[in-house]
Amino acid sequence: MIVLITGASAGFGAAMARTFVSNGHRAILAARRTERIEELARELGEAALPVTLDVTSRASIEAALTKLPEGWRDIDVLINNAGLALNTKPAHEVPLEDWDTMIATNCQGLVTMTRALLPGMVARGSGLVINLGSVAGHYPYPGGNVYGATKAFVEQFTLNLRADLVGTGVRATNLAPGLCGGTEFSNVRFKGDDAAAAKVYEGTTPLTAEDIANTAYWIATLPPHVNVNSIELMPTCQGFSPFAIKRN
């Protein structure tokens, strides 16, 4: 199969590329950081194709897909992995620019990629879209505000895809991880403050990028009549908090 992975330059995306290629499949490595994906492609060999692409730009997406070589265009699996969280401040303190960036990447970029590849999948009568959601899309927490809202959008968009795709042979899954270490997620969220990022995982055994990659691979290799609507993962060190109550 051919899998296109957005955000393939690091974290979940890079781990997914390694997992699919090591199991005999081909991977299109899509990301903004050209040097990173070219380095990963050298590691993975001829089964990997680096493609510079910015999901927040429709023109970038269209140009990248148009330039795909023959033999790489019939994409079987789209993994909408590109996404980010910015800031943990309360809603009334977060810069609007951070919200704009999260919406542009996590929502607009995801739907634009999906719309670009979906017609081909439907025409071929097979295909799979895996959208990277988050437990933040299910459970609110202080500082989650727009990040959590974007991931709730991802879940609902995925379920509505299923409603439209019944009988087409095309599947859609919302893959929603909880606390996951070994990626750039928290470093990006805290805008390069590595100490603050490290504190998120202090004293924990979080999920790993490989855990998420293995889950995506399992979903992609299920029999074609099986659709995983939504799958949620947490490490055993993570659970649920009580409701916040302000007391006088």
Image (cartoon, rainbow, N blue to C red):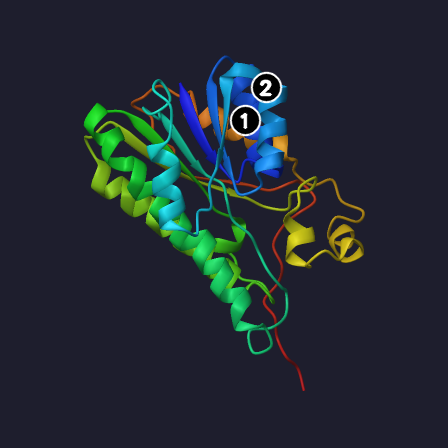
Name above or below for residue 110 compared with residue 193: above
* x and y percentages locating residue 199 in the rendered image: 78, 54
Residue 191 placement, left or right of 145? right
The residue most toward the bottom is: 248
Name above or below for residue 152 compared with residue 118: below
Viewer-side residue, 150 vs 113: 113
Residue 145 in view, yes or no: no
Quadrant holding the C terminus = bottom right
Name above or below for residue 92 compared with residue 33: below
User: Does dot 1 land on a helix, a strand or a loop?
Assistant: helix
Q: Are marks 2 and 1 in contact (CB under 8 Å)?
A: yes
Residue 136 placement, left or right of 228? right
Name above or below for residue 50 compared with residue 142: above
Residue marked by disc 1: 17
Question: In which image quadrant can residue 118 be found?
Answer: top left
Viewer-side residue, 20 vs 149: 20
Residue 168 in view, yes or no: yes
The label nearer to you, 2 versus 1, is 2
Question: In which image quadrant can residue 9 be found?
Answer: top right
- Residue visible at 40% across and 45% down in the picture: 60
Residue 209 placement, left or right of 232? right
Residue marked by disc 2: 44
Viewer-side residue, 45 vs 131: 45
* x and y percentages locating residue 92 in the rendered image: 56, 78
